[in-house]
Amino acid sequence: MTQKKRYALVGTGSRAGMFVEAITKTYPEFAELVAFCDLSQTRMDFYNEQLVEQAGVGPLPTYLAADFDKMIEETKPDTVIVTTMDATHHQYIVRAMELGCDAISEKPMTTDIDRMKAIYDAIDRTGKSLRVTFNYRYAPAYTRFRELVMEGKVGRPLAVDFSWLLDTSHGADYFRRWHREKKNSGGLLVHKATHHFDLVNWWIDSYPKQVMAMGDLLFYGKENAEARGEHYSYNRYTGVPEAKDDPFALFLDDKQVYKRLYLDAEPETGYLRDRNVFGEPVTAEDTMNVSVRYENGVLLSYNLIAYSPWEGLRVAITGTKGRIELDVSENINHLQGDGAAKESKGAFKSARMRVYPMFGESYPVEIPVGEGGHGGADPVMLRQIFSPDPPYDKFHRAASHIDGAASILVGISANRSMETNCMVNVPDLFVLPKKTTEPAK
Ligand SMILES: NC(=O)c1ccc[n+]([C@@H]2O[C@H](COP(=O)([O-])OP(=O)(O)OC[C@H]3O[C@@H](n4cnc5c(N)ncnc54)[C@H](O)[C@@H]3O)[C@@H](O)[C@H]2O)c1
């Protein structure tokens, strides 16, 4: 019998639920969760209660963040899963490796160049591995898009147009909590767009070379609201009667999972999950345009808006032999889940994919449908991570620290470009290895 791999998890917020459920319910034959670590004892206790009630596992040993080393020493995990706030990922990735563990990190790998260098340095010193969980690659529709490029439907890719719209539920959620301060998340061009830049890097099989960006905070934040004549007397929503009819409100006492994970934990860490999106401070942009030139010559034009009436994306790749287009409208249903592991964000409401040969009739492409979170992506990725014999993946979807870096380098360079009003040469910030695979024909 294969020996079970031992996992410890640091960062017991909402995203942790997907990993906890995968290890304890879907892959318990092959994987074992051995400990939790977080700033909040309340959040760790909540996960332990769920484990005992729903999976008959645990309670697991819990360790406050200051006792991370003690956790590794006492519970001896093979791999540490990092699902903390973005700007803290590097601390745990680096320390886990120094203490002899591999690491799996949620996206974004980290938020700036110094943190990225610290991760690379730890990998060099320890020889340990890092996997970045870019689940979007595994969504059947995005995998099919990659397959069309691999099949040569566009010939050699030359241009990518990509617009991503976050709606007033999901997009707003980044402005209710820690993401809205760039020091925590790198802003949405790092925190959110890391998914999108990773998809482009992977679809066209290249790395970014030059980046120019513009971005502003045009909708959220106190100043924008007041300029529109909207005034708010409250800094958060929960427990505020005047917020009752506010369409942006999130009430943490409405849903058990929010109450237990966030409201009950406030006295410990002061983390407010329901801040008024029209309050202060907000340092992240909500409207962004980015132009990228890739090493293989492809030009990308990318837009991100965080206050759209509908959620989804429009992407097209045009090349020497044709064009493929994909339009997706997502059924975000963002605030409906009750139960830490039950969110099914990003399920597709409708989707359209079409190939336009350079000369010839265009035709539709069937979009494979997947069950589960993020358009069916999460279960496929979890199988690749936790099953001992994952099927061979011709799409090479498992993302390394190099992929993690290649995607955040676009966002970090875009942030630099916005600060300086100049184009950024990516290798001036960080040199990525040369691509070893041939570009798609
Ligand atoms: N791949 C995806 O689709 C996806 C979806 C959601 C979130 N995420 C990622 O998962 C991570 C967590 O996001 P979330 O939505 O669960 O956030 P969250 O705020 O619900 O949870 C974050 C947790 O990290 C803990 N934490 C913060 N600083 C810490 C520190 N210094 N040491 C230890 N613990 C610390 C907090 O106490 C909290 O429990 C983020 O990196 C986010 O980008 C990825």
Image: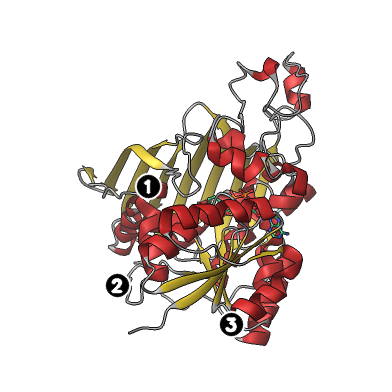
The image position of residue 96, as x and y in percent, is 65, 76
Q: How many residues crowd mark 1 within 10 Å: few (<14), some (14–19), many (20+)?
A: many
Q: Which mark is residue 128?
A: 3
The reply to whether the residue tagged 2 has its Cβ within 8 angstroms of ligand 1 is no
Asked if the residues shown at circle 1 and circle 3 are in contact, with their CB atoms under 8 angstroms apart, the answer is no
Q: What residue appears at the point 41 percent right and 83 percent down from the top-left corner?
A: 3
Callout 3 crowding tier (Cα within 10 Å): few <14, some 14–19, many ≥20: some
Pinpoint residue 166: horizontal percent, then vertical percent: 53, 36
Residue under the image location 38 percent in, 42 percent down: 347
Q: Which type of secondary structure does the marked residue at label 2 adopt?
A: loop
Quarter where residue 61 is shown: bottom right
Which numbered disc, 1 or 3, marks the residue that appears first in the sequence? Answer: 3
Q: CA distance from mark 3 to mark 2?
A: 23 Å
Q: Is residue 50 in view?
A: yes
Q: Nearer the viewer, residue 214 or 359?
A: 214
Whichever of labels 3 and 2 marks the residue nearer the N terminus, that label is 3
The C terminus is located in which quarter?
bottom left
Q: Earlier in the sequence, mark 2 or mark 1?
A: 1
CA–CA distance in space, label 1 to label 3 = 31 Å
Mark number for residue 50? none
Q: Which mark is residue 391?
A: 2
Q: Give the vertical position of 30 relative to 347 (above or below).
A: below
Q: Amino acid at mark 2?
A: Pro
Quick one: 67 or 328, which is closer to the camera?
A: 67
To which residue does mark 1 refer?
375
Q: Amino acid at mark 1?
A: Gly
Q: Is label 1 in a helix, a strand or a loop? A: helix
Where residue 275 sits in the image (x, y, percent)? 70, 33
Q: Quadrant of residue 247?
A: top right
Amino acid identity at mark 3: Lys
Residue 172, given in percent of the width and then of the height, sits at 60, 33
